[in-house]
Image: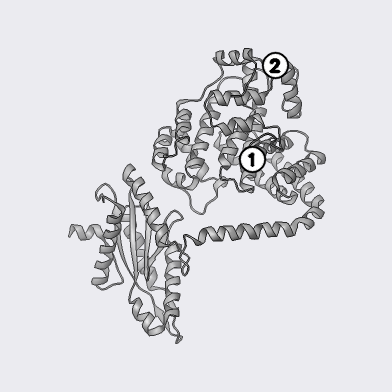
């Protein structure tokens, strides 16, 4: 645990006005430390606090996680954010709500939160730039890096008498605190996080939040700490004097320590200008003036882009090589889970997703549906018109299925001319509507055969749903039911959809 003077530690423990993590935050920490935690458990916890659930929904639909379709329920929001990100964001919401309680004693509370929100937003953006998957954890650490200042304001407000800590360089503020208390806000903040049983990496990042080099930090934590430290420096540009020297110095530090070129940093300034109002709204704070944000964005872009054209030219080739390597890596990752011909998911990926979604749906009594899709008379097309025509038809159908479903649905080629669709959260009625629409839309599609004549496409579909009225024991049973419904469609003339539940009721 981080060491601070014993007398100060006793004063902090005895301070009744210094908030401690609320019960929801404690539960979130426990979930984050449990490797067996699943989406359903997180959903239960988040749902228990309507205010936090609303914020999770809002941030999933915000510009911070831009998507083509909006999440309409908590489950979809959790899929968008992911387990770890949801837990971290929920923790940040609860801690901020707790820390904002009680009037300040010694310094400008708005200035404190202005820097915190700025730093958090910058931290998340920087983490994403160099590929960290824990960008939300960086966000939380950056958001809390000045936590110790709130503690000092509670137990020793005289430390800030006569100074404006957010108008001074943070290093000078820390030196002033050491003169008064024999320690500074970084160590106090890290001590508090340890005392609250927060994740270790948060305390480490807060303790080293002024060290952009991350000296003395384990290698696997260096980029995490550097992003947090740099977030504070970038936040200060927006708060203090936005002179050319400060902006150019920030550009050099970001390039040297994070590998981000000045022209890219200029683009990030524009992104920050767009994201700050979103973060401000989510945390329900009114801190920033829109004209001021635009002024700083324009100034930074001019200095970093126009005055760094020489650097941009020298590094363009390296940047292009980096993008090519990143594209190659992403392509290899996708290749393992994609069907080579149609580019939809393959059978192995589908079966893994079906098992995962089936368990979650069964546990929480959420509906989910499966649709089996078969191309009518596909063998005849292959035999009469050749495999090239057959392949072209498979690609056409894959495109139809993909464009007709939601981002959260899964389209997979199950084998041969069979496709299978996984529709989390949709009941039998909604799945039936989608199936009928797919049958109708397929009739309007054709491909050109080898002889130049159009070949019509028709589909046979079978749907099955897991819900409270039709509970299957295992995923294979649900899949078999959809397959049985598909067989019913083909046996009764093809070019139609059959619902398994209708067969059962007959």
Q: Quadrant of the C terminus?
A: bottom left
Q: Quadrant of residue 136?
A: top right
Residue 41 in the image, given as x and y percentages of width and height: 39, 38
Q: Quadrant of residue 1?
A: top right
**Label 2 sits on residue:** 181
Residue 270 in the image, given as x and y percentages of width and height: 68, 47
- Front residue (pair 464, 300): 464
Residue 2 in the image, given as x and y percentages of width and height: 61, 24
Q: Is residue 494 above or below residue 429?
A: below
Q: Is residue 496 above or below residue 350?
A: below
Dot 2 falls on a residue whose secondary structure is helix
132 relative to 108 in the view: left or right: left
Residue farthest to the bottom, as pictured: 451
Q: Is residue 125 above or below residue 386?
A: above
Count residues near mark 1 (Cα–Cα under 10 Å), then give few for <14, some for 14-19, many for 20+. Answer: few
Dot 1 falls on a residue whose secondary structure is helix
Tag shown at residue 496? none
79 relative to 136 in the view: left or right: left
**Label 1 sits on residue:** 219
Q: Looking at the image, is mark 2 or mark 1 earlier in the sequence?
A: 2
Q: Is residue 330 above or below residue 26?
A: below
Count residues near mark 2 (Cα–Cα under 10 Å), then give few for <14, some for 14-19, many for 20+. Answer: some
- Front residue (pair 20, 269): 20
């Amino acid at each position: 645990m981080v060491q601070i003077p014993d007398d100060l530690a006793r004063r902090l423990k005895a301070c009744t006005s210094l908030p401690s993590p609320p019960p929801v935050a404690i539960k979130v920490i426990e979930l984050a430390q449990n490797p067996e935690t699943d989406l359903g458990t997180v959903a239960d916890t988040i749902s228990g606090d309507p205010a936090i659930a609303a914020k999770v929904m809002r941030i999933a639909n915000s510009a911070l996680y831009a998507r083509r379709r909006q999440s309409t329920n908590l489950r979809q929001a959790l899929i968008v954010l992911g387990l770890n990100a949801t837990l971290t964001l929920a923790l940040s919401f609860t801690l901020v709500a707790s820390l904002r309680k009680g009037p300040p004693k010694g310094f400008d509370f708005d200035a404190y939160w202005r820097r915190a929100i700025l730093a958090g937003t910058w931290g998340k953006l920087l983490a994403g730039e160099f590929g960290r998957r824990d960008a939300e954890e960086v966000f939380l650490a950056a958001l809390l890096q000045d936590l110790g200042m709130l503690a000092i304001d509670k137990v020793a407000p005289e430390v800030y008498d006569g100074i404006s800590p957010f108008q001074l360089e943070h290093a000078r503020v820390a030196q002033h605190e050491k003169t008064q208390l024999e320690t500074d806000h970084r160590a106090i903040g890290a001590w508090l996080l340890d005392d609250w049983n927060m994740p270790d990496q948060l305390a480490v990042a807060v303790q080293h939040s002024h060290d952009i080099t991350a000296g003395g930090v384990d290698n696997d934590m260096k980029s995490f700490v550097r992003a947090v430290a740099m977030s504070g420096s970038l936040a200060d540009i927006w708060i203090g004097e936005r002179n050319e020297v400060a902006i150019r110095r920030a550009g050099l530090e970001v390039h040297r320590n994070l590998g981000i070129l000045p022209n890219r940093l200029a683009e990030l300034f524009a992104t920050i200008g767009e994201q700050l109002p979103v973060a401000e709204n989510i945390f329900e704070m009114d801190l920033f003036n829109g004209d001021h944000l635009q002024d700083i964005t324009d100034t930074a872009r001019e200095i970093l882009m126009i005055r760094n054209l020489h650097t941009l030219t020298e590094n363009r080739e390296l940047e292009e090589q980096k993008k090519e390597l990143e594209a190659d890596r992403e392509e290899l990752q996708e290749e393992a889970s994609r069907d080579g011909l149609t580019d939809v998911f393959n059978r192995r990926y589908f079966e893994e997703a079906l098992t995962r979604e089936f368990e979650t749906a069964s546990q929480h009594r959420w509906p989910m549906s499966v649709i089996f899709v078969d191309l009518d008379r596909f063998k005849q097309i292959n035999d009469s018109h050749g495999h090239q025509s057959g392949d072209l038809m498979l690609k056409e159908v894959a495109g139809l299925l993909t464009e007709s479903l939601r981002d959260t649905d899964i389209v997979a080629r199950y084998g041969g001319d069979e496709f299978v669709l996984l529709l989390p959260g949709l009941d039998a009625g909604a799945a039936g509507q989608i199936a009928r629409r797919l049958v109708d839309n397929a009739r309007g599609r054709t491909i050109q055969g080898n002889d130049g004549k159009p070949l019509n496409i028709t589909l046979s579909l079978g749907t099955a749903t897991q819900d409270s009225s039709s509970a299957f024991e295992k995923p294979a049973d649900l899949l078999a039911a959809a397959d049985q419904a598909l067989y019913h469609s083909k046996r009764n003339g093809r070019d139609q959809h059959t619902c398994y539940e209708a067969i059962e009721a007959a």
